[in-house]
Image (spheres, rainbow, N blue to C red):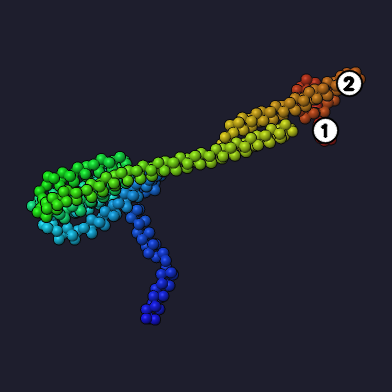
Amino acid sequence: MDERKLWSSIEQERAHEHPGLLQEISGGIMRAWFRFSTPNAKFRAQHPDPLSQSQLASLLLLMGIITAIAFIPSAIVSVHMHTLFPVLGLLLVLFICIPLNRAGRVAVVGVLLILAIDATIMISLLSYPGLMLSQNAIPIYDLFVLSDIVAVSLLPRKSILYISLFHSIFICADVYLQPHTADLHELLLRTNYSIMVRPLAIQLLVAIVTYAWVRNTVQAVKRADQAELVAQLEHELAQQKKNLDEGIQSILQTLVQSANGDMQVRAPLSRDNVLWQLGSALNILLARLQRAQQNERQLQQMRSELARVLYTVQEARKRQKSIELMPGGTEVDPLISELLHSYLVPSPPHFRDK
């Protein structure tokens, strides 16, 4: 007894040491299956799938493949193996749907799955030995709910209503039109056909519940998308306001510096800023003002030089002396030299500095 407790405690300690090993293995298998059977990241980025229908279709395909493989042994041992070929056909369709789902054709996958599941169930019911419907066939009607699940998962939600109605009509027609075995005939008479309430009620309940559930889910997803969109817009508006404030402050600082006489200042606005066009126009204006200021300074220097030359000439005439002019370092010097027919002597360094 103590040995059993000891081994039990050891196993518990091992389980606590690696609590997520099974989860990691199963998670790795599912990730590999999703990579194999769902669209790649580039396709998902170009075709948003808020309801993750491609992953849901991939999961349904995996469950369908496992279920179909599990049904093969029972189909082999069935009478005349009348269910083997429908099951194999369903398995083939499931494998065909994998590349379709990887290509993003979720609606096509849903239609093929519904057709394959319904065909498998119908052929199994209609191919009973002697085409006689037995009592064992009644539970098979419940399997139509698999098609309902596929429809409500991968197709527009209203499709579940039409598919459920089709299933109900087929169930009623099959029970009333297909020949019965003795045990089924006796059961139907004894229960006054009330045994058929269960498969019909399942179809009705599944259709109503899943339709309402999917409708609420879609509405919730839309509200979540709208809330996410509003939050994204608010973030973008806040970022634009921040850029606008920064641009306004940069332009104001540029205007203040230029008003204080610094004509070399420029507004450092990039094209990412909403005011970059205004900043570019301001920079052009400042550049032109800087050139105008330089031209005004040069013009003032030329006026001063002309006044100096005129004063020197006038003084030389009054005193009847030769004109001696030193160059003023302006563009007027060559003109004065030609007009006076004399060369200007170089000016002392201290005069140039002045």
Residue placed under numbered mark 1 in the picture? 354
Q: Earlier in the sequence, mark 1 or mark 2?
A: 2
Judging from the image, what secondary structure is the residue with disc 2 in?
helix
Q: Nearer the viewer, residue 341 or 218?
A: 218
Q: Residue at x 53, y 41 (%)?
A: 235
The amino acid beneath tag 2 is: Glu
Q: Quadrant of the C terminus?
A: top right
Q: Residue 251 placed where, x, y %?
A: 65, 34
**Vertical position of residue 28 compared to residue 176: above or below:** below
The furthest residue to the bottom: 2
Give left or right: position of 341 versus 276. right
Mark 1 and mark 2: Cα distance apart in space: 22 Å
Count of marks overlaid on the render: 2
Residue placed under numbered mark 2 in the picture? 315
**Vertical position of residue 264 compared to residue 112: above or below:** above
Q: Residue at x 60, y 31 (%)?
A: 278
Q: Nearer the viewer, mark 1 or mark 2?
A: 1
Q: Residue at x 41, y 75 (%)?
A: 9
The amino acid beneath tag 1 is: Lys
Q: Residue 145 placed where, x, y %?
A: 26, 49
Q: Residue 335 placed where, x, y %?
A: 75, 22
Give left or right: position of 262 versus 53. right
Mark 2 surroundings within 10 Å by alpha-carbon count, few (fewer than 14), some (14 through 19), many (20 or more):
some
Give left or right: position of 206 versus 3. left
Q: Nearer the viewer, residue 159 or 297?
A: 159
Task: Examine the rendering and report whether any part of residue 311 can be seen.
Answer: yes
**Vertical position of residue 116 compared to residue 320: above or below:** below
Q: Nearer the viewer, residue 347 or 202?
A: 202
The furthest residue to the left: 130
Mark 1 surroundings within 10 Å by alpha-carbon count, few (fewer than 14), some (14 through 19), many (20 or more):
few
> Picture quarter containing residue 294?
top right
